[in-house]
Amino acid sequence: MSKKILVSGSIAFDVIMSFDGIFSETIDSTQKNIGAAFLVHELKKHFGGCATNISYNLRLLGEDPILLGSVGSDFQEYQLALQEIGIRTSFIKKHDDVYTAQAFITTDKSGNQLTSFYPGAMNLSHLNEIPPDDIAVAIISPDGYEGMLTRIRQCEDRSIKFLFDPGQGLPMFSKKDLVSCVEKASFIAFNEHEWVLFQKLSGLTMSDLMIMGKVVIVTLGAEGSRISFDQNEIYTPSINVDNPLDPTGCGDAFRAGLLYGYINDLDWSDSAKVATTMGAFAVQYEGTQSHNFNKEQFNHLLYENFNLNIS
């Protein structure tokens, strides 16, 4: 039985709306009670969620990830889409009395955003169990709070190395639980904002994490990424593309590249190059699961920028 990558986290719909105006010109912030309405001129519904985004990108790289998450009664269309690209859905737990998690994001013409998030079935993710497969590495991505803590305990019980990726869920964690999660993890990932917030919430510094023997990944958006381990730091620049369209989901694509590198015995430097190339493909498309490529196209961009190929 071949070793697998376990991807645990949110499965969600992203409802994206565009408002052809400016929020601040519609909302009177001096009023005690606000009753604003925005007529949106465009609405798109995308498949999203951190776990499904990561799994989608791993599938593009030829891996067979184990997707573990919770969904609601409205999952049928999403399930068919996942199965069509070869992602197994047998370990996704369905709850018919709630809806799948959904994010509602409205953007005005100045780029300001109003976001509402309905967690739905995501709050029941602690009821899931890790399957008995031979798992080489796991990623614990943003999910229900209790679900993330449960999955970490399950990984610890099974001696499964995991990447702790708290993401936008960071504020949910107490200092005690955050430190405990980090102590159990082998690898930790943040974007630049999350890295600053993590240090504030946990009281831990990079020096502390190096002493603990952790691998720390910090993505820097258009500026690239840093990976720190054993008192070393690897910086990888981003790839400039002609038509960057939507950075949403690029972090998930990057994490998929890192996991691919790990399971295929690449060092951290080459893993970061694969991850960066994944992000370069993702940023050129709207939505988090819209990009596609074959191995030849991927290797062309990877070699062109980093003089590297993957088999």
Image (cartoon, rainbow, N blue to C red):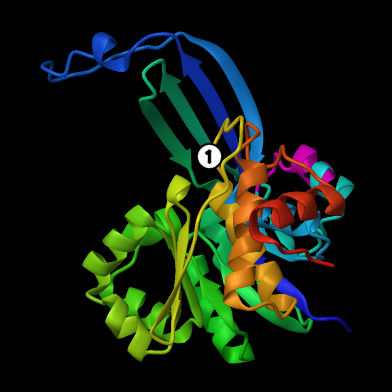
Q: Which residues are magenta?
A: 72-80
The percent coordinates of residue 33 (x first, y second) are 18, 19
The percent coordinates of residue 111 (x first, y second) are 39, 24
Above or below, 124 against 34 in this view is below
Residue at coordinates 43% horizontally, 62% vertically from top-left?
A: 190
Amino acid at circle 1: Pro
Residue at coordinates 76% horizontally, 65% vertically from top-left?
A: 65
Quarter of the rendering containing residue 145: bottom left
Q: Which residue is labeled 1 in the image?
A: 247
On the rendered image, what quadrant is the C terminus found in?
bottom right
SS label for mark 1 = loop
The percent coordinates of residue 291 (x first, y second) are 72, 40
Horizontally, is 100 left or right of 300 in the view?
left
Q: Foreground: 170 or 230? A: 230
Q: Residues within 10 Å of mark 1 (few under 14, many from 20)?
A: some
Above or below, 158 against 49 in this view is below
Above or below, 240 against 107 in this view is below
Horizontally, is 221 left or right of 192 in the view?
right
